[in-house]
Amino acid sequence: MNNTSFPIPMLHSTIRIMAPFLLAAIGGLFTELAGMLNIALEGLMLVGAFFSVVFAAATGSLFLGILLGIAASVLAAYIFGFISLNLRANVFITGLATNLFAEGITVVLAFQIFGNKGVIRFENLSKLPVLSIPALQRIPVLGDIFVGHNVLVYVSWLMVVIAAIVIYKTPFGLRIRGTGSNPAAVEAIGLSPKRYRMYAILISGFTCGLAGAILSLQMGAFVPGITAGRGWIALVAIYLGNKTPHGILIACIVFGFAESFSNYAQGFINMPADFILAFPYIITVIAMIAFSILQHYRLKGVER
Amino acid sequence: MDRKRIANLLSSTTGLALTVGISFAIVVLLILVLSEQPGTAIYYFFVGPFTNAYYFGNMLNQAIPLIFTGLGIAVAFRSSTFNLGGEGQAYSGALVATVICLALPTLPGFVGGTAAIIGAILIGAFLAGLSGFFRMRWETDQLISSFLVSSAVILIINFLVTGPLDDPANSMLTTARIAQQFQFLKIYRPSKLDASIFFAVAIAIGTYFFMQRTHWGYEMRMCGINREFSKYAGINVGKYLLVPMAISGGFHGLAGAVTVLGTHYRCLKGVTAGLGWNGIAVALIAKNNPIAVIPAALFFAYLDAGAKAAMLHADVTFELAKIAQAVIFFLVTAQALYGLFNSRKKKVTT
């Protein structure tokens, strides 16, 4: 491998890898701000991944596939929300249930439809369209890193901007935040915190569906457990990002880079694949502990 | 008082019956939609585990590690600590037990078995204790840290089992087989049921007394009810962020050890998969009561056994059990279902 060009492809793939993290975390940010720990991100992503690739293959249209994949994920989110809010179940437990249910239903359906519990390939699936603007690509370094990804990668960045505007600049965002920080006040002005929690959950269903679609469509295949803990890492990104869209963006860049780096490291050091897969978790837990140590001493400083 | 108790019991029983009923209804619906032989599939899913001694014994056997993971979660939840790393802790217990037995093949059965079990308990307690320590020291979120540590551990064990510790003589992804003398006694042949079921029941009863009748148990429960209050009552609350986690992890390690010593005799890839998650559901169904963990674990084992029987006799897949379990998970904490009967009674009594 050419030494001088080595960091560029690594950074290029960082941008690609981080997109699903980013989408899931942005959706999770809404539920987090509305005062709920959303453990279901992982399961919602899995539902989106399965149904988008299956529907894309069935309809022959990527766009329809993505749309129906998102619809499935939003429906799953609605069930999760309905049981948590209307039947007043513990959100943490229903989140776990959503993940288990997603794992079960995708494998059961895959088995009954395709007769296969392993990797399901869809050969005649078209690739996600790649956005390539030759003029921009000629910009040294930046052009190489940021141009030439599939469209959904750019959608994920766009989503960060939209989320920032919605959360900080609209009444809806204010109400979502109010639902988390002071539900009594939201209720006092005649609004229903429950309803805003449901909106937040549905938004997380939407972004997780899209995140899942990226995972399966860029492979043109569905693999059981294709999300491989990404929903959990997205959850950590929300914390490390201090519950702000731009903070999440930075956290996701770090995680994307960690994964991209370990992929490349595999080429140099002969590391087994399972170790590589463990790497993002280890980085994440270290980052999380470092963050809480920082917070701990910052709070102590304030007390003094 | 008595009437209130009866009302409570009635409402939680109806809630549980509804929860189970809905989950069964969804499984039946799925089978009707997906299977080409729905009659056979439904029959074996529900009745299969009781049709012969082999299925029945295996079902009981399956409940043993679930009793341990259920106890582990019950102790943690009772103390308001959260252990989401059960999957990794159980798996590490299975690995360590196997490694100890493989490293000391000439030890007498009892000594080596005990060493393996202690090693498994210690590794589980250590892994869960880490998250307890982080929370105690720096308020790191326990839920997420225990999950992340466990996920990393699972992948590293997968690597060990399929790489350095892989048994080349065996085509499966697994370590070598442990020596004969370490294997638990079979008590109900031809099924896999082994003597550790008595041990599991005894431990469940012991845990009940530990939580209800000892100083530590009392302080742990107090911290679970109100940590702030306990602090002012002079309880060392920091200690009880760590201790329940370590106990919980120890139980999960133990579950891994009995899986190896009692059933598989080797650490297969993913040998304990599902034990951690299902332990949470078992504890919730049991309302964190250690004795109620026993029937709850049997019930979960029944779902697994039913799905396995249905898979062997019809065209459905084992993961149906997962769906039934997930539905129970969804509804088991739903207050709307559980308050159906006692809402009216409550108003009268209070």
Image (tube, rainbow, N blue to C red):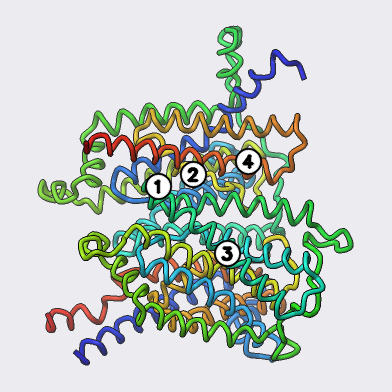
Dot 3 amino acid type: Leu
Is B266 left, or right, of B148 in this rendering?
right
Q: Which disc, if any, is residue B140?
A: 1
- Mark 4 lies on a secondary structure that is loop
- Side of A181 relative to B74 (left or right): left
Q: Secondary structure at mark 1?
A: loop
- Residue B337, placed above or below residue A299: below
Query: Where is residue A234 shown, x and y percent of the image?
Result: 47, 41
Q: Amino acid at mark 4?
A: Gly
Which mark, by number, is residue A209?
2
**Residue in front for this viewpoint, B335 or A271:** A271
Looking at the rendered structure, which numbered label has been put on residue B122?
Answer: 3
Please tell me whether mark 1 or mark 4 is closer to you in this view.
1
Tell me the element at label 2.
helix
- Structural distance between the alpha carbons of marks 1 and 4: 47 Å
Residue at position x 62%, y 90% from top?
Answer: B50
Residue B67 horizontal/vertical position (percent): 53, 77
Determine the CA span between mark 4 and mark 3. Answer: 54 Å
Identify the residue under disc 4: A60
Looking at the image, which is closer to me, B308 or B148? B148
How far is disc 3 from disc 2 in space, using C-alphas? 40 Å
Image quarter where the C terminus of chain B lies is: bottom left
Residue A5 sits in quarter: top right
- Tell if the residue under mark 2 belongs to the same chain as the one under mark 4: yes
Q: Residue at x 58, y 84 (%)?
A: B199
Q: Are marks 1 and 2 in contact (CB under 8 Å)?
A: no
Q: CA distance from mark 1 to mark 3?
A: 22 Å
